[in-house]
Image (spheres, rainbow, N blue to C red):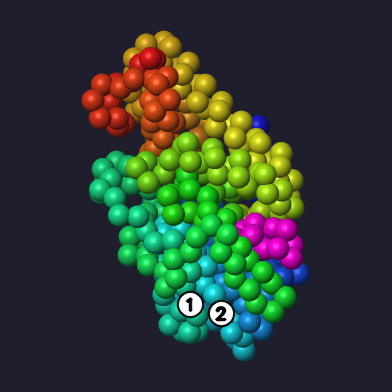
Amino acid sequence: MIPYVREIEFEYGRCDQVSPLIRRVIADNPGPFTYTGTGTYIVGRGTVAVIDPGPDLDGHLQALLAALDGETVSHILVTHHHSDHSPLARPLARATGATIYGRRAPHLAEAASDLTLEAGDDDGFRPDVEIADGAVFEGPGWTLRAVTTPGHTSNHVCFALAEENALFSGDHIMGWSTTVITPPDGDMGAYFASLDKVKALDFDTLWPTHGSPVREVAPFIQAYADHRRAREAQILAALAAGPTTIKAMVPTLYAAVDPRLHPAAAMSVLAHVLLLVKEGRVTCEGVAGLDSEYRLA
């Protein structure tokens, strides 16, 4: 079982000091994929970095500008291009003169309508500066380093805060829920590798964009990975009973999950199955999709 951390005390628009170097403002965009809403982080004092500005909501922009009054924003850092993370980056940059850093939205064939998540994509996201793994961003009393973590999306990147041995984990690892892996951009093999990468870095705290921090990092990441391997085993067990489709498997595999999340769950199952096909453990007739028939190799 994943030891979820779901308790959180906040008010929309309020700026809370959550650690010596970190403040957080939560946007009013709660939902089944965003939990209580997008948590935008402000790192430092005087000259600061802003991580994941969030959705393009004027109320959230005004709350951030109030929290930043009298300060200089040197960096706007974006973990990935989903519409609950990146759209406010450009309006915030215009208001503050800051530079936007991140990895651009991938150009992919349009996904089928039944594969669309509520969060959606910010397909127009273009950072001012394209960053690579290990890129360093500094201000007075704070140092952030980019940790690329493909899996949830191909352009996902986390940010490590050296002074607190903490990681802003975006949607890569969340305390309140598992992360959706959405093909064709999301990749389960890359996700497993990124989990191992973060675990090896031995952080004291994870600060997800949604929900509360994770303090027991190593066992939490292990539980995250174990959960994925258990889901993989369930898929293989379902296929052992005979050929079937992802749409047929999801209601049983995710019987305890809010049905509103079943379309997203189907995407994660597809990501698992694509990895199993790549590994030669499962076969598929034709192009792999939700309605395709899969069988054990």
Q: Amino acid at mark 1?
A: Thr
Question: How dense is the environment of label 2, judged by Cα within 10 Å: few (below 14), some, or many (20 and up)?
Answer: many
CB within 8 Å, label 2 to label 1: yes
Q: Which residue is mark 2?
A: 74
Pick the residue in front: 8 or 40: 40
**Residue 214 on image: x %, y %:** 69, 50
Pick the residue in front: 253 or 95: 95
Q: Is residue 20 above or below residue 147?
A: below
What residue lies at 72% left-to-right and 75% top-to-bottom?
A: 141
Name the quadrant of the C terminus: top left
Q: Is residue 213 visible?
A: no
Q: Amino acid at mark 2?
A: Ser
Magenta span main SS: strand
Q: Is residue 135 above or below residue 228?
A: below
In the rendered structure, which disc, 2 or 1, sits on the residue that comes first in sequence? Answer: 2
**Residue 45 on image: x %, y %:** 68, 79
**Residue 120 on image: x %, y %:** 37, 54
For residue 19, which numbered disc appears in the image?
A: none
Q: Quadrant of residue 41?
A: bottom right
Q: Which residues are magenta?
A: 159-168
Left or right of 51: which side holds 8?
right
Q: Is residue 166 magenta?
A: yes
For residue 99, which numbered disc appears in the image?
A: 1
